[in-house]
Amino acid sequence: MGKNVIKFVCGECGYESGKWLGRCPACNSWNTLQEERIDNKPRITGELKGRAVALSHIENERVERFSTGIGELDRVLGGGIVPGSLILLGGDPGIGKSTLLLQVADHIAGKGEKVLYLSGEESFKQIRLRSLRLGINNENIYLLNEQNIDFLGDFVQKIKPRLVIIDSIQTVYSGNLSSIPGSVSQLKECTARITELAKASDISVFLVGHVTKEGAIAGPKILEHMVDVVVYFEGEKNFAFRLLRGIKNRFGATDELGILEMTGQGLLEVKDPSQYFLDTEAKNVSGTAVAVSFEGSRPFLIEMQALVASSLPPYVRRMAFGIEQNRLALLIAVLEKRRGILLTNCDVYLKVTGGLFLKDPAVDLAVIGAVFSSYKDKPLPSDMVFIGEVGLSGKIRQVPFIDARLKEAEKMGYKKAVIPAGLSFKPGFDPRMEIIQVGMLDEFIEVLM
Ligand code: TYD
Ligand code: MG
């Protein structure tokens, strides 16, 4: 006989402990361990259901994806939804997950396919209000307010949807477990049950997962390994644009980025991100430099804004919004050590326009350019872009996709590009821009003087 065991499970990462701890030793989050009753049922043995098949005997089926109707989401999914797949859409509450999925539901319903939308969070009335606001009124969208996942299979059989939306995974439960909805064991159990259903009936499922700061319910992180595709929906509440970031994809490339804009009519695609992230008003102002960042499979231009202001040590500030704080500190250290520009008596603030967070090291050169420009209070040429990673030695390091980056800058009307020395272009690519190659930080600063 199995018996129930009490365990303490971290809602962020799923770490299990025999006793309660204030801080999770695995992910260092505070107050995320919750008491859970783990049902230790014995494994049922019975008829053999599985089978082993020679790899070469498995038919080669082409995966037929279907579109979500939102190009930016299709891009992040690797070209659309794969039938039978589970997609986790994570994000902060209020960021627009339900809005996005209702729009997807509308597109698929418009193709004559059925969509089952399980809402554990909002009443039918609330969803109806949103749908009216979005101009969505399709009889192929079925709303379900049953939070017990054990009945989902029955509804799927009855309605035969192409797509199921679970909004959110933290509000559903299975009667198999005694723990509350949103606990780690419920999340895992429900996701496992939904996976079985999806694979057996070849329907695709979107799971909405709220990212939680407080540990009352578990976050979507612990489900990442159980699903096929993980997409995070990000953005600042004060900005209209939203980012779809692909974190995991069993059917395509990860690190893909989709850009949407939240409007009164719901989410719209941003087809030309460069236009979106350039602050054209700010030309001829000191402290700004344009970088060409590569996110996912495409480049876009984005502006770095720096402010160097005098300060009283020891309260010197270094603040970065949109790049890693430590990276700014490191680049300032390189500027001080390799060029003798002392910023010890200065506060340095750096901001990426639009509230985007960039990981691409190729924006280093623009960061240094912006900081230097603010320090000298001298605007940089407004038709110039900066591409390159800066090493600790002051060497300007090469970056991938230089051709695509330069093409994007040309497209946006820029005339000059500062890039790492020694780069060769692909045959057939002949940039019309003036190319300035710099090998070391010193040479770069000379260009800016
Ligand atoms: P919602 O999709 O409910 O967020 P989530 O499901 O991630 O919690 O979106 C919430 C916000 O979006 C809300 O503050 C209102 C705003 N919104 C618009 O700006 N335009 C719209 O057309 C809609 C439907 C919502
Ligand atoms: Mg919602």
Image (cartoon, helix red, strand yellow):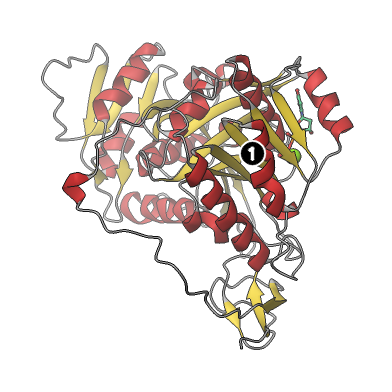
Viewer-side residue, 327 vs 91: 91
Vertical arrangement, residue 346 with respect to residue 413, above or below: below
According to the picture, the residue beneath numbered tag 1 turns out to be: 156
Q: Residue furthest front?
A: 47
Q: Residue furthest left?
A: 427
Residue at the image position 30 percent from the left and 36 percent from the top: 444
Compared across the picture, whether 429 is left or right of 241 comes to left
Residue at the image position 16 percent from the left and 33 percent from the top: 423
Query: Could you tell me which secondary element the residue under label 1 belongs to?
Result: helix
* Quadrant of the rendered image holding ligand 1: top right
Compared across the picture, whether 42 is left or right of 428 comes to right
Q: What kind of residue is marked 1?
A: Val
Vertical arrangement, residue 258 with respect to residue 149, above or below: above
Q: Which quadrant of the figure has residue 360?
A: top left
Compared across the picture, whether 89 is left or right of 397 comes to right
Viewer-side residue, 232 vs 379: 232
Q: Which quadrant of the figure has residue 134?
A: top right
Vertical arrangement, residue 363 with respect to residue 194, above or below: above
Residue at the image position 35 percent from the left and 56 percent from the top: 337
Quadrant where the C terminus is found in the figure: top left
Vertical arrangement, residue 234 with respect to residue 128, above or below: below
Viewer-side residue, 59 vs 173: 59
Q: Residue furthest right?
A: 125
Mark 1: C-beta under 8 Å from nearest atom of ligand 2: no
Q: Look at the image and tell me whether residue 288 can be seen.
A: no
Q: Which quadrant of the figure has residue 359?
A: top left
Residue at the image position 65 percent from the left and 66 percent from the top: 184
**Residue 231 place in picture, x, y as percent:** 53, 42
**Residue 235 place in picture, x, y as percent:** 63, 38
**Residue 39 place in picture, x, y as percent:** 65, 77
Quadrant where the N terminus is found in the figure: bottom right
